[in-house]
Image: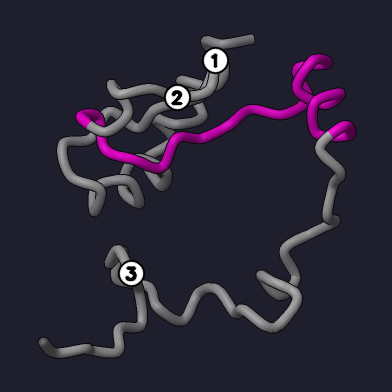
């Protein structure tokens, strides 16, 4: 058996974009309680983005989650940058 150190578990080609410290993602925003998150979801202030590929997303997801509809997980970055995820989000509103 061998163990390798990787910059990214799933490679998006951008290992330096997120900084993680002992509290989680550095500069990642305010931590919410589960109750506060549920309230935002009910008010439709929050939209979940399903970061899995289309095959994985067919297995199950949160109701109303935006799915990238890409065949490979690596294509998610391009879907986000192209604005397709924003268009899908607008369709949910």
Q: What residue sits 32% from the left and 46% below the top?
A: 76
Residue 64 position within the rendered picture, expressed as x and y whole percent measured from the top left:
55, 15
Work out whether residue 60 or residue 41 is closer to the camera in this orientation and state it: 60
In the displayed structure, would residue 34 be above or below residue 78? above
Question: Magenta segment: does it hold 77?
Answer: no
> Whole-Å distance between the Cαs marked 2 and 1?
6 Å
Categorize mark 2 by other alpha carbons within 10 Å: few (<14), some (14-19), many (20+).
some
**Left or right: 6 as drawn, with respect to 41:** left
Q: What residue sits 58% from the left and 31% below the top?
A: 48
Q: Which colour scheme appears in the figure? A: one colour
Residue 61 position within the rendered picture, expressed as x and y whole percent measured from the top left:
45, 24
Q: How many marks?
A: 3
Question: Which numbered circle lies on residue 61?
Answer: 2
> Whole-Å distance between the Cαs marked 3 and 1?
26 Å
Q: Secondary structure at mark 2?
A: loop
Categorize mark 3 by other alpha carbons within 10 Å: few (<14), some (14-19), many (20+).
few
Residue 33 position within the rendered picture, expressed as x and y whole percent measured from the top left:
86, 43
| Residue designated by label 3 | 9
- Which picture quadrant has residue 35? top right
Q: Are marks 2 and 1 in contact (CB under 8 Å)?
A: yes
Q: What residue sits 35% from the left and 51% below the top?
A: 77
- Which picture quadrant has residue 14? bottom left
Magenta span: 35-55
Residue 38 position within the rendered picture, expressed as x and y whole percent measured from the top left:
80, 26
């Amino acid at each position: 058996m061998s163990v390798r150190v990787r910059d990214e578990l799933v490679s998006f080609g951008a290992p330096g974009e997120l900084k993680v410290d002992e509290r989680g993602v550095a500069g990642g925003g305010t931590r919410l309680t589960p109750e506060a998150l549920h309230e935002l979801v009910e008010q439709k202030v929050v939209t979940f983005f399903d970061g899995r590929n289309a095959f994985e997303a067919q297995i199950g997801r949160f109701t109303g989650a935006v799915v990238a509809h890409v065949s490979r997980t690596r294509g998610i970055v391009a879907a986000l940058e192209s604005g397709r995820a924003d268009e899908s989000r607008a369709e949910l509103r």
